[in-house]
Amino acid sequence: MAKKTNYTKNGKNYYRIHRKINGKYEEFYGKTKSEAEDKYYERKKEVELGIIQSKDVTLDTLMHKWIYEIKKYDDIKPSTFESYEGTYRNYVKNSDIANLKLFNIKSIILQEHYNKLSKNGFSSSKIKKLNKLLYQFFKYTIKEGYINRNPAENITIPKLEKENIKKDEEIEYYTEKEVKQIKKALTKNKELELLVLFALGTGLRQGELLALRYSDIDYEKMQLHVNRTTKISYVFNEDNKKERKQMFLEPKTKNSKRVVDIPSNIFNRLEKKNTDELIFTDNGKVWDARKLYRHWLYFLKENKLPIKKFHALRHTYATLLLSKGVELITVSKLLGHSSIKITEIYSHVIPSLKTNAVNKLNSIL
């Protein structure tokens, strides 16, 4: 009859066996030989599946190294890494899931964590962003043999109740009457005048405007070429400390690279220069977005104009074109949207568009 135990530790009896795993001998313990053998076969199966790393590694421990030692040196934009780092630091590090062992993390655990975040007021976009980063991280851990399935799959991103409300009211834009008031007030503010008129007349994003050079202008066709954008990004040095830096970057999507006609009234205000100089500068320097916003805000308050973000000028460009009968697909291309579905948000904020469209049937009916 086989012995039930063959090893004693701290006054307790166990059955211990030695088996070779991945070229090295390991010890397995159980209350019986059968139980010890079961643990050996479970471990052997894990190795065959590629799970050969320590089960003690936590999510935060490995993700920290992945962020700063791998993603930091990937061929990605500084702004992309800044986003990754911020998501990790704000939503993983010191979170409820940070100290969980990688081996034990399942989809249901992440789902519970996301549901809790949603109940605490986190938007679905932030949770989706977190899950997207975790999905990338877990893909890496699978390749490295820490786990064999990606727990960030089969996830339902929860939504706040208020997120189900249409976002029509979130679109800020100026009416025709307000645009005329802005134009009149700008005659007393030469610093902002051409920049704001260009934003209203071309619909360029703020970063695209501030990166615009004289060499981007086609003076014969009265057009501009959008080839780049500028933004302030935080670049991480060797000590992983953030440094604020002005960056000139390729547009985010292929549709963002586009040709836009310039209204003649605005084109005629432009100097004709055959140089790579920036058109809009702050005393010769690149505009800092935060400083520009302060100037814009002061201008609005000083002239008792409706307070809206600078980006509202781009929304105004779109709504004015649509209200004048320009087709949605054309507006979409002018704005550089990746899909016409993005442009459709503007048609919801101009109820008269639907009415006018239906009334065109009057000539037939």
Image: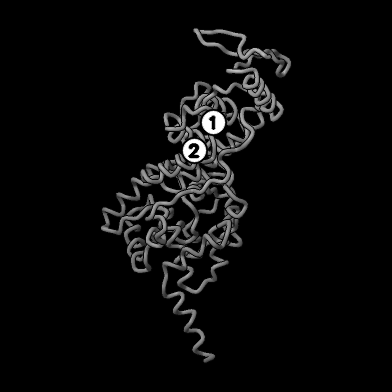
Question: Quick check: 55 above or below 155?
Answer: above
Disc 1 to disc 2, C-alpha distance: 9 Å
Residue 115, image quadrant: top left
Judge the density around disc 2: few (<14), some (14-19), many (≥20) Cα neighbours within 10 Å: some
Residue 192 at least partly seen? yes
The structure residue drawn at horizontal position 26% and vertical position 58%, both measured from the top left corner, is 304
Amino acid type of the residue tagged 1 in the rendering: Asn
* Element on which disc 1 rests: helix
The structure residue drawn at horizontal position 47% and vertical position 73%, both measured from the top left corner, is 324
Q: Is residue 284 left or right of residue 52?
A: left
Viewer-nearest residue: 119 or 35: 35
Classify the position of the N terminus by image quarter: top right
Q: What count of labels does the image hold? A: 2
Q: Is residue 195 left or right of residue 133?
A: left
Amino acid type of the residue tagged 2 in the rendering: Ile
Which mark, residue 104? 1
Which mark, residue 109? 2
Seen from this angle, which residue lies furthest bottom?
365
Viewer-nearest residue: 353 or 286: 353
Picture coordinates of residue 337 (x, y %)?
Answer: 55, 57
Question: Quick check: 357 above or below 178?
Answer: below
Circles 1 and 2, Cβ within 8 Å, touching? The answer is yes
Q: Is residue 294 left or right of residue 234?
A: left
